[in-house]
Image: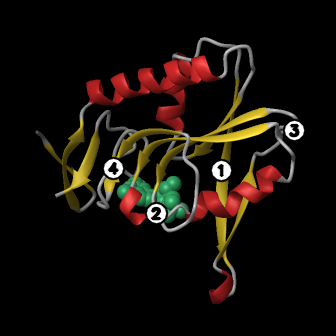
Amino acid sequence: MSVVTVKDKSFETYLDEATIQKRIKELAAKINTDYSGKKPLFIAILNGSFMFASDLFKHITIEAELSFIKLASYKGMKSSGNVVTSIGMDDDLFGKEVIIVEDIVDTGKTLYSFLPKLMHQQPKSLKIATLLHKSEATEYPLQLDYIGFVIPNKFVVGYGLDYDGLGRNLKEIYQLV
Ligand code: 5GP
C-alpha cells in the first residue's frame, strides 16, 4: 500500500493498476459479446473518464465508434436543482446503440439529469458503463449496465479522477486516508 499527497490531502492505494486493468478487460469482453454483430457508439464523459475510455476501447474487438463529450451543470433555482448541458455532442444518436462511459457514479444526479437529453434523440438502445459506483451514495434511479467496481462512499482520486484538478495522471485509484 502506498500513500500519495495530492494538493493538501493524503490518499492511500485502493485499486492497483493490475486490478483495474483486469476488470476493464472483463467489462470489454462482456460488451464484445453483448454487442456482437452491432456497431455501438461509446460516448465518454470528460474529463474523468478519459483513461477508462481509452483502456476499455483498446479491448473492444467489435466494430465501434467513440466520442467524447463534456457535461456542464448550471445551478438553476434551488428547488429545481442542476440543469445539465453537453459540450461537443455532435453525433446524431438516432437509431444508434449508445454506451455511455463514466468514471464514477456517485449520487447519480449528473447522468440522471442528462439521460433525457440523449433519449430525446431516439437512440436504438442506451446503456451505461461506469468504472466506479458509490452504491451507498446513489440517490437517483439509474440502471448501470456495466460496473467496474462498487466502492464505499469515500472520495477517490487517480486513473482520470481528480482532486481539485490534480491527480488524474495516477495509474492507480487512491482513497482519502
Ligand atoms: P454524481 O452526479 O453521480 O453525484 O457525481 C458525478 C460526478 O461527481 C463524477 O462524474 C465525478 O466527476 C464527481 N465525483 C463523485 N465522486 C467522486 C470521487 O470520489 N472522486 C472524484 N475525483 N470525483 C468524484
Labels 3 and 4: the sequence-earlier one: 3
Q: Nearer the viewer, residue 151 or 21?
A: 151
Categorize mark 1 by other alpha carbons within 10 Å: few (<14), some (14-19), many (20+): some
Residue position for label 1 = 70
Labels 3 and 1: the sequence-earlier one: 1
The answer to whether the residue labelled 2 contacts the one labelled 1, judged by CB atoms less than 8 Å apart, is no
Q: Is residue 94 positioned above or below 32 on the image?
A: below
Label 4, ligand 1: CB separation under 8 Å: yes
Categorize mark 3 by other alpha carbons within 10 Å: few (<14), some (14-19), many (20+): few
Labels 4 and 2: the sequence-earlier one: 2
Residue position for label 3 = 92
Quick one: SS at disc 1? strand
Residue 164 appears in view: no
The alpha-carbon separation of the residues under discs 3 and 4 comes to: 33 Å
Residue position for label 2 = 138
The alpha-carbon separation of the residues under discs 3 and 2 comes to: 30 Å
The alpha-carbon separation of the residues under discs 4 and 2 comes to: 18 Å
Residue 72: image x %, image y %?
66, 61
Residue type marked 2? Thr
Residue at the image point whose x is 85% and y is 53% from the top: 120
The answer to whether the residue labelled 3 contacts the one labelled 4, judged by CB atoms less than 8 Å apart, is no
Residue 130: image x %, image y %?
50, 42
Residue type marked 3? Asp
Residue at the image point whose x is 53% and y is 37% from the top: 50
Q: Quadrant of residue 135?
A: bottom left
Residue type marked 4? Val
Label 2, ligand 1: CB separation under 8 Å: yes
Quick one: SS at disc 3? loop
**In the image, which disc is placed on residue 157?**
4
Residue at the image point whose x is 65% and y is 40% from the top: 127
